[in-house]
Image (spheres, rainbow, N blue to C red):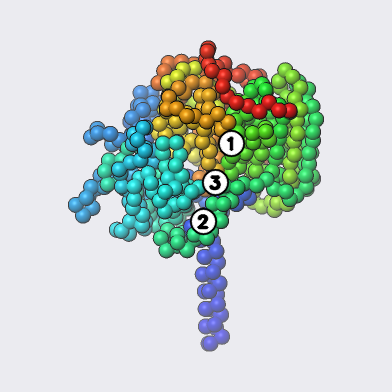
Amino acid sequence: MKIKKFFCLLALGVSVLMSAQGQVSIESLLTEMVNRDAISRFPQNNFRLKQASSYNRASKTPKDTVGWFTNNDFNKGEKSINFIRIEENKGEKEWVMMEDSGPGAIVRVWSPWLDQLKPGSDIIIRIYLDGNPKPVLEGNMISLFDGTGIFPYPFAHQSLRSGVSFFPIPYAKSCKITALKQPFFFQYTYKKYNQGTAVKTFTMKDFNNAKPLIEKIGKELLNPQNTKEGKKVAIKESVKTNKEASISLPTGEGAVRSLVLKLGDYKNPAVTRSVVLKMEFDGQQTVWTPIGDFFGTGIGLNPVQGWNQTVDADGTMSCRWVMPYKKSGKITVVNLGKESVDVQLEARVGAYKWDAQTLYFNAAWRGQYPVPTRPFSDWNYVSLKGRGVYVGDALTIMNPVAKWWGEGDEKIWVDGEDFPSLFGTGTEDYYAYSWGGRSTEFYEHPFHAQPRSYVYNKLNPKTTNEKNTSGYSTETRTRALDGMPFESSLVLDMEVWSGTKCDMGYGVGMYWYGDVNTTSNRTPDPKGVLVIPPLPEGFPHTIKMNDKK
């Protein structure tokens, strides 16, 4: 009996240990955030990404072309009810902004300034987990998430006129977020795990215990490195107009772990649109994207550093997406421009263990000029069919007028749902800043950036408070914990909502992982990439570039 009891206790201990190892927690999510291999696989802990936001509740169906494009996506005054409800708690009113039941984790928070010229907010919020009547977190709606509160930079940071946090807040049973006065704009993005997923609920004790890991992961996010390991495959040659140059990857199972591209010069800003990256894995083409949209520089050379992509001031462009393959791979640079280009291309290929969850890396491009701003419309980034994970995009627009162009909301449908899982409050909010009419300066963060706006970029910083939003703007967003899994389909639309009736230009690169049979509605467009939306007449050409060869 003693031996039987011993083995029963041993089995129980092993079971508990295995459960802990597979449990979602602060530590597991932080580790997942910087695990480049993890995002190349469909998640073992299956979830759907959801978002609670102050989107306009008049938007109910695209068939109602008035309500669907109404721009009252905030709360101001008694008639604004873009939240869940008001409830009373011990004599205090609380405005409920997010409510979820079942296992999950908050993975992104966006909170804007209440006034575009006055930093901050006077709104206090509370986060309740697992039905506990005492909030696990309580604090100012901005400072709690701008890197000055408990969540350190770079997990939380001061974006342009907003606070943005990617620090994970897991919960096992439920989550409710409330405000102690009427909230203005808000977005809370969260993973909704399948029922039965083991989750260890966020506590301040666990947060404090995780501080060494938090510091370690923070340093990794701020210092992304191209791998030096694996087999190096490279070319250096001049590619004539309408010609291409390729490198073949080592045969057998493996993965591209870094990709570095540099052109001879960038004197002509259009070169980042007319030079295209094309990739094939296991005989199937999965990437066809202009280099500016692939690396996030937009039109011209606009230096920026992120977790997955970096563009240096000398024109070196790096990508750190993991791109697995079973047998073979090929990377090609295509020159669609009118002049020859000097190209340096280097790929590092390392080991990778393919399994049933492994997905292929995909990137595609869509461009259109002109895009009329009236009538209001939804502009489709991409529509996907099959299984995969959507992981990012880079949008470049051309605005012909000084007034603000980006009130349009993202609307993302997953797996054929009737209403979007994510319905946002503005294009700039999707790209993690606010008051876009005035926020025309450069900024960067590991997961999002504005490499260029109006005449400003990293080499030409803004020093005034003017509001001109004309010309090219480039916005980037890549996803780690807020990647979007889909099992049958995903549709991402961005609303075209300018304050002016005019013709704009749109171009976007999109990135996702998918099964071999996952398809998209995007195909190579060699003619479209050569249509560069013209800058408005008299536009000041003051963007600085590095003209060295």
Q: Name the residue under label 3.
A: 480
Label total for image? 3
Q: Mark 2 points at which residue?
A: 214
Residue 363 x %, y %: 63, 35
Q: Which residue lies furthest to the front in this view?
A: 463
The residue lying toward the viewer, choosing from 527 and 285, is 527
Q: Identity of the amino acid at label 3?
A: Ala
The residue lying toward the viewer, choosing from 272 and 313, is 313
The residue lying toward the viewer, choosing from 520 and 308, is 308
Q: Identity of the amino acid at label 2?
A: Ile
Name which of mark 2 and mark 1 comes first in the sequence: 2
Circle 1 Cα neighbour tier, 10 Å, few/some/many (<14 / 14–19 / ≥20): many
Circle 2 Cα neighbour tier, 10 Å, few/some/many (<14 / 14–19 / ≥20): many
The residue drawn where x is 35% and y is 26% is: 70
Query: Do we see residue 307 in this rendering?
Result: yes
Label 2 vs label 3: CA separation?
16 Å
Q: Residue furthest bottom?
A: 1
Query: Do we see residue 369 in this rendering?
Result: no
Q: Name the residue under label 1.
A: 304
The residue drawn where x is 62% and y is 18% is: 531
Residue 549 x %, y %: 73, 28
Label 2 vs label 1: CA separation?
24 Å
Name the element at disc 3. loop
Specify the label residue 275 is tagged with.
Answer: none
